[in-house]
Image: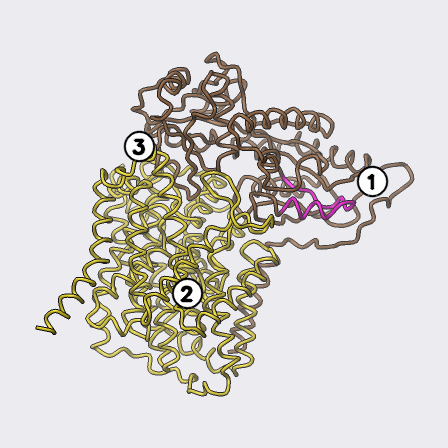
Amino acid sequence: MGSLEGILSGVQLAFSIEGILFVFLGVLAGTLIGMMPGLGPISAIAIMIPLTYNMDPTVALVLMAGVYYGAVFGGSTSSILLNAPGISGTVATSFDGYPMAQRGEAGKALAVAAISSFVGGTVSVVLLMLFAPALSSVAVVFGPPEYFALMVLGLTAISSLSDGSTVKALISAVLGIMAVTIGIDSQTGTTRFTFNNPNLLEGIDFLVVALGLFALSEVCALIINRSQTSKDRKSLGSLKLSKSELKDMSGPVGRQSILGFILGVLPGAGATIASFIGYITEKKLAKKPKEFGKGAVRGVAAPETANNAATSGAFVPLLSLGIPGSGTTAVLLGALLVLDIQPGPLLMGEQPQLFWGVIVSMYVGNLFLLILNLPLIPYIAKILAIPRPLLISLVIMFSMIGVYSISFNTFDLYLLLIFGIIGYLMRLFKFPPAPFILAFILGGMMEESFRQAMTMSNNDLSVFINKPIALGMLIAAFLSFVVPIWQGYYRKKKHAA
Amino acid sequence: MKKFWLSTLALCTGLTLAACGGGENEESNADNNAGDGSWQPEQSIEFVAPSGAGGGWDTTARMAAEGFEEQNIMDEGIGVVNKEGGGGAVGWAYIAGKAENPHHLFVASPPLLLIPLNGQSEYGYEDFTPIANMISDYGAFAVREDAPWDDLNELFDDMKDNPDNITVIGESSPGSMDHIQFIKIAKEAGVDPQSVKYVSAQDGSTMTNLLNGNADVYSTGVTETVEQVRAGEIKVLGVTAEERLEGEVVEDFPTAVEQGIDATFINWRGFFGPPGMTDAQIAYYEEKFQELNDSAHWEDTREKYAWNELYMDSEEYAEFLKEEEKTMQELLDDVNMQEE
């Protein structure tokens, strides 16, 4: 079966009435789920599995994939409006999206997010069509040494995530690494910092930390400083983006569509890491990096493009190799098994209709998402007009529902509260929370891949140097650490001369 | 605007409720029922999967619940609840707290023995009431297609000489299933259990690491290997079943036993109840699970998931578990994983 024929059969399915109906239902459900803090695509897809028993497998996958990328698309809304990330992939969006909303530019921030998500999603689907077969070999290139190097590279960004004291940023990052070590150590099976509490054995979920540090700490601040923050947060601002703003975001959107896609292809990296790395690279490349963190259009565009591009990228290992690269794609894989589809290297040849049908439906889905989201912005943004006491209680309630729905365990609610208090204290003493969350994500993977690599190489450190990709990334990490210091030194010298 | 929030709230609670499956009724009156010594449930029944949605325990619980419903085997409704955490420990603690209330059952498999032995749960199998084992699964040891070994003996001989050169990878942490199933077979073949270099990759990268050469042997379940074998990427050197498995592809996998290594590892899966169930209650459930097991519907389910039939009633199950626990303890002693 030639691939053209396969693509045509996919197009046929994606544009059938059934295909269009289910992709619409999928993205609609996904957007709504994404908008609610904490409620992620994983549980939504798992709950949907029984509904798909008697469906055509392709249609079922079209529906579930729609939920997945729809959630990533919609997840930016609550990050921007409430500082409460809808899903883990949109934490980085709150860094600049929330300041924009506070400045009275909520509408603009949401529009930037919607447009970047659309472009990221669509460009990456094109890349998926063109390169899925070829990229499957790239997906397996990365082993522990490469992941370790990638995480190190990501962590060098800590300094760029703080606008004040670097020392405080580093302390915040160390706290993040400490928090992620809680639980059963994957390489020895020993429990670490669990204090014999079975609830801590699996470690702390990322969303508990994110919602605590961002949403709840914001709520604390709003309550405690209620007298002084009477800034007009109610205005939605214009939705329209000026020409210069569009031009400003075109660079990040273009680059992150590709970078995000590549990171999505790597199993284990996924939308969350792509959004952070997208944010960081754009900050490094920006002419005015100081604007980042204070409501820069690019700061919203970069992570929103990257996380949506990564979502399509995650389908490469799933569909071309049968290897799930993330928690959500693992649940999708399970769903396919129920439908008697065995995802594996032969899927593309044996079931071209399924393979291409899903991919083509993703174009349609992204278009639906844009049409759904853009006109809704004025209405959604009116959330900000809700009287503050009511809004605060809603944020608290939704954060709690979100955290509870991770594993239906009330213990997580106490943890959420603790992280909310930590977040507020950090805010009070001007410790930036972003390095904490970055170290929490990257630190855990860094430790695991480092130790896996060490075991595999019998504790020989040269394993990181003998692999060209790993070496390249480590050099890049070293440069991004050293160059600013050298630049500063050079400038000072020049100044003195 | 209010409408938006209300509808999202409705959707949200709807999802939460759907996931919880209801059945949070707490009244416990175990010794109700007619004087003839039989017992009937007096409220809806809860199947607990001590893991997140989508895994093996969850699938078993959901499919069994569906089977009971479809076949009208029980009068009461069944809800499936996920209690995730600690590799099962959180769910077990929850069931242990339901003593005397026989409406809460849970799905378990070898981790119920291994995790307590590793000191990671205060409750073990003897704290619960075994009701019925339903299915079994087996482990498979896969290597790349171009690997130098063609059967388990070649691999193990090489391992005896150069243990440092061979990395075994599995999903779960050391001391748990993927590790122990390999140790059990390797030890029987004469490999020093402590020399086995085992790496755990819990982010789903196990197969990737086998394919890209970072790991040499992949210890996993039989079904996980099928597609890559069909594609000619990997080969399975041995499975831990007693006899050849049935079905396309898997029927070509040699067992360890037929290669002269007299060891098996069964990934059994069955249902347990809370502590202190009466004989009448056990008898009630035994009968129902037996009926499910014999149904054509369940046969279809087994086929769909490539599960094997392994039915044991409560008494057999308890015997079996006692033996298994002893074996697991020995293996953990061998690799020094047990709690001090």
Closest to the observer, A202 or A333: A202
Q: x%, y% of residue A371? A: 36, 68
Q: Which residue is mark 2?
A: A74
Colour displayed for chain A in the image of the structure: yellow
Same chain check for tags 1 and 3: yes
Q: Amino acid at mark 3?
A: Gly
Horizontal side of A276 relative to B53 (left or right) equals left
What is the chain letter for disc 3? B
Distance between the Cα atoms at labels 1 and 3? Answer: 57 Å
Colour displayed for chain B in the image of the structure: brown
For this orientation, the residue located farthest to the top is B260
Q: Determine the secondary structure under disc 1.
A: loop
Distance between the Cα atoms at labels 1 and 2? Answer: 51 Å
* Numbered tag placed on residue B39 in the rendering: 1
* Numbered tag placed on residue B213 in the rendering: 3
For this orientation, the residue located farthest to the right is B35
Magenta-colored stretch includes residue A431 = no
Closest to the observer, B179 or B312: B179
> Crowdedness of circle 2 by 10 Å Cα count: few (<14), some, many (20+)?
many
What is the chain letter for disc 2? A
Q: x%, y% of residue B7? A: 55, 70
Q: Amino acid at mark 1?
A: Trp
